[in-house]
Amino acid sequence: MLSGEYQHTLDSKGRVIMPVKLREELGDNFVVTKGLDKNLLVFSQDEWTKFYEKLSTLPLANKNSRGFSRLFLAGAIECETDKQGRILITQPLKEYAGLEKDVTIIGNGDKVEIWSTQNWNDYMNSIDTDEIAESLCELGIMI
Protein backbone atom coordinates (compact mmCIF):
# COMPACT_ATOMS: atom_id res chain seq x y z
CA MET A 1 0.00 0.00 0.00
CA LEU A 2 1.33 3.40 -1.00
CA SER A 3 1.31 5.84 1.91
CA GLY A 4 3.14 8.77 3.44
CA GLU A 5 3.66 12.46 2.74
CA TYR A 6 6.93 13.77 1.32
CA GLN A 7 8.21 17.26 0.55
CA HIS A 8 10.43 17.74 -2.49
CA THR A 9 11.51 20.40 -4.96
CA LEU A 10 10.97 20.49 -8.70
CA ASP A 11 14.28 21.33 -10.38
CA SER A 12 14.71 23.77 -13.28
CA LYS A 13 14.35 20.93 -15.82
CA GLY A 14 11.01 19.77 -14.37
CA ARG A 15 12.37 16.77 -12.49
CA VAL A 16 11.35 15.71 -9.01
CA ILE A 17 12.65 12.95 -6.78
CA MET A 18 10.20 10.11 -6.27
CA PRO A 19 10.62 8.97 -2.65
CA VAL A 20 12.42 5.62 -2.31
CA LYS A 21 9.56 3.96 -0.41
CA LEU A 22 7.10 4.86 -3.15
CA ARG A 23 9.51 3.94 -5.98
CA GLU A 24 9.96 0.50 -4.47
CA GLU A 25 6.21 -0.11 -4.55
CA LEU A 26 5.54 1.52 -7.95
CA GLY A 27 8.19 -0.50 -9.75
CA ASP A 28 10.61 0.57 -12.47
CA ASN A 29 8.03 2.02 -14.87
CA PHE A 30 4.85 3.86 -14.03
CA VAL A 31 2.33 6.29 -15.49
CA VAL A 32 1.76 9.93 -14.51
CA THR A 33 -1.46 11.68 -15.51
CA LYS A 34 -3.83 14.48 -14.48
CA GLY A 35 -5.83 14.07 -11.29
CA LEU A 36 -9.25 15.43 -10.36
CA ASP A 37 -8.01 17.98 -7.80
CA LYS A 38 -5.47 19.90 -9.91
CA ASN A 39 -2.87 17.36 -8.90
CA LEU A 40 -1.11 14.53 -10.70
CA LEU A 41 -1.75 10.83 -10.25
CA VAL A 42 0.98 8.21 -10.47
CA PHE A 43 0.03 4.59 -11.16
CA SER A 44 2.16 1.46 -11.28
CA GLN A 45 1.88 -0.30 -14.64
CA ASP A 46 -0.47 -2.91 -13.13
CA GLU A 47 -2.74 -0.30 -11.53
CA TRP A 48 -2.73 1.78 -14.73
CA THR A 49 -3.86 -1.26 -16.72
CA LYS A 50 -6.72 -1.85 -14.26
CA PHE A 51 -7.68 1.84 -14.39
CA TYR A 52 -7.55 1.90 -18.20
CA GLU A 53 -9.75 -1.20 -18.40
CA LYS A 54 -12.37 0.60 -16.31
CA LEU A 55 -12.12 3.71 -18.50
CA SER A 56 -12.52 1.63 -21.65
CA THR A 57 -15.91 0.37 -20.45
CA LEU A 58 -17.37 3.88 -20.29
CA PRO A 59 -19.99 4.52 -22.99
CA LEU A 60 -18.58 6.49 -25.91
CA ALA A 61 -21.97 8.08 -26.55
CA ASN A 62 -21.94 9.77 -23.14
CA LYS A 63 -20.35 13.25 -23.18
CA ASN A 64 -19.19 13.04 -19.54
CA SER A 65 -17.62 9.63 -20.15
CA ARG A 66 -15.65 10.98 -23.08
CA GLY A 67 -14.46 13.97 -21.08
CA PHE A 68 -13.51 11.84 -18.09
CA SER A 69 -11.52 9.48 -20.30
CA ARG A 70 -9.79 12.36 -22.10
CA LEU A 71 -8.76 13.96 -18.82
CA PHE A 72 -6.76 10.90 -17.81
CA LEU A 73 -5.53 9.58 -21.15
CA ALA A 74 -4.56 12.69 -23.13
CA GLY A 75 -1.79 13.81 -20.79
CA ALA A 76 -0.67 10.43 -19.50
CA ILE A 77 3.06 9.79 -19.73
CA GLU A 78 5.09 6.70 -19.00
CA CYS A 79 7.96 7.38 -16.62
CA GLU A 80 10.96 5.70 -15.15
CA THR A 81 13.34 7.16 -12.64
CA ASP A 82 16.85 8.26 -13.50
CA LYS A 83 19.90 7.24 -11.44
CA GLN A 84 19.08 9.90 -8.83
CA GLY A 85 15.49 8.65 -8.44
CA ARG A 86 13.95 11.60 -10.32
CA ILE A 87 11.12 11.64 -12.84
CA LEU A 88 10.54 14.26 -15.51
CA ILE A 89 7.18 16.04 -15.38
CA THR A 90 6.09 17.42 -18.76
CA GLN A 91 5.25 21.10 -19.12
CA PRO A 92 1.51 20.48 -19.70
CA LEU A 93 1.31 18.36 -16.53
CA LYS A 94 3.27 20.95 -14.53
CA GLU A 95 0.91 23.68 -15.71
CA TYR A 96 -2.22 21.62 -14.99
CA ALA A 97 -1.14 20.91 -11.40
CA GLY A 98 0.42 24.34 -10.79
CA LEU A 99 3.82 22.81 -10.08
CA GLU A 100 6.52 25.44 -9.82
CA LYS A 101 9.06 24.62 -7.13
CA ASP A 102 7.80 23.05 -3.89
CA VAL A 103 5.89 19.82 -4.33
CA THR A 104 4.20 17.43 -1.95
CA ILE A 105 4.07 13.77 -2.88
CA ILE A 106 1.63 11.52 -1.08
CA GLY A 107 0.90 7.83 -1.16
CA ASN A 108 -2.82 7.20 -1.49
CA GLY A 109 -3.46 3.46 -1.38
CA ASP A 110 -3.05 2.15 -4.92
CA LYS A 111 -1.63 5.37 -6.39
CA VAL A 112 0.65 8.31 -5.65
CA GLU A 113 -0.41 11.95 -5.91
CA ILE A 114 1.86 14.87 -6.75
CA TRP A 115 0.65 18.30 -5.60
CA SER A 116 2.05 21.79 -5.57
CA THR A 117 2.74 22.26 -1.87
CA GLN A 118 0.55 25.38 -1.83
CA ASN A 119 -2.40 23.51 -3.39
CA TRP A 120 -1.90 20.60 -0.96
CA ASN A 121 -1.88 22.94 2.05
CA ASP A 122 -4.95 24.80 0.76
CA TYR A 123 -6.74 21.50 0.21
CA MET A 124 -5.86 20.15 3.65
CA ASN A 125 -7.01 23.39 5.30
CA SER A 126 -10.30 23.30 3.40
CA ILE A 127 -11.50 19.82 4.28
CA ASP A 128 -14.03 19.32 7.05
CA THR A 129 -13.19 16.01 8.70
CA ASP A 130 -16.50 15.89 10.58
CA GLU A 131 -18.45 16.30 7.34
CA ILE A 132 -16.37 13.61 5.62
CA ALA A 133 -16.83 11.20 8.53
CA GLU A 134 -20.60 11.75 8.51
CA SER A 135 -20.88 11.20 4.76
CA LEU A 136 -18.83 7.99 5.03
CA CYS A 137 -21.11 6.75 7.79
CA GLU A 138 -24.08 7.35 5.49
CA LEU A 139 -22.36 5.08 2.96
CA GLY A 140 -21.95 2.41 5.63
CA ILE A 141 -18.24 3.03 6.17
CA MET A 142 -17.52 3.27 9.87
CA ILE A 143 -14.30 4.85 11.01
Image: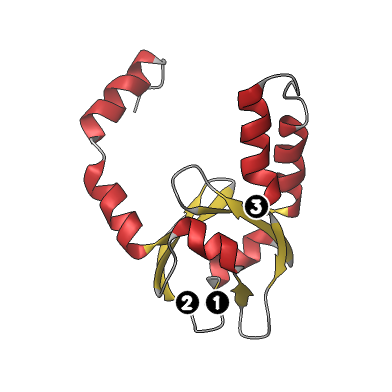
Using the rendered view, name the quadrant where residue 132 is placed. Answer: top left
- Residue 2, visible in the rendered structure: no
Q: 125 or 25, which lies in front?
A: 125
Callout 2 crowding tier (Cα within 10 Å): few <14, some 14–19, many ≥20:
many
Measured in 3D between alpha carbons, the distance from the residue under mark 2 to the one under mark 3, in whole angstroms, is 19 Å
> Would you say 40 lies left or right of 84 here?
left
Q: 141 or 122, which lies in front?
A: 122
User: What is the count of numbered marks?
Assistant: 3
Which residue occupies 53% across, 47% down? 35
Instruction: Identify the disc placed on residue 14.
Output: 1
The residue at which mark 3 appears reads as 43
Residues at marks 1 and 2 touching, judged by CB atoms closer than 8 Å: yes
Judged from the image, the secondary structure of the residue bearing numbered disc 3 is strand
- Badge 3 or badge 1: first in the primary sequence: 1
Picture coordinates of residue 62 (x, y %)? 68, 20
Measured in 3D between alpha carbons, the distance from the residue under mark 1 to the one under mark 2, in whole angstroms, is 6 Å
Picture coordinates of residue 7 (x, y %)? 39, 70
Using the rendered view, name the quadrant where residue 4 is placed. Answer: bottom left
Instruction: Identify the disc placed on residue 10.
Output: 2
Picture coordinates of residue 79 (x, y %)? 70, 66
Check disc 1 and give the amino acid type: Gly
Judged from the image, the secondary structure of the residue bearing numbered disc 2 is loop
- Badge 2 or badge 3: first in the primary sequence: 2
Judged from the image, the secondary structure of the residue bearing numbered disc 1 is loop
Task: Report the quarter where the C terminus lies.
Answer: top left
- Residue 16, visible in the rendered structure: yes
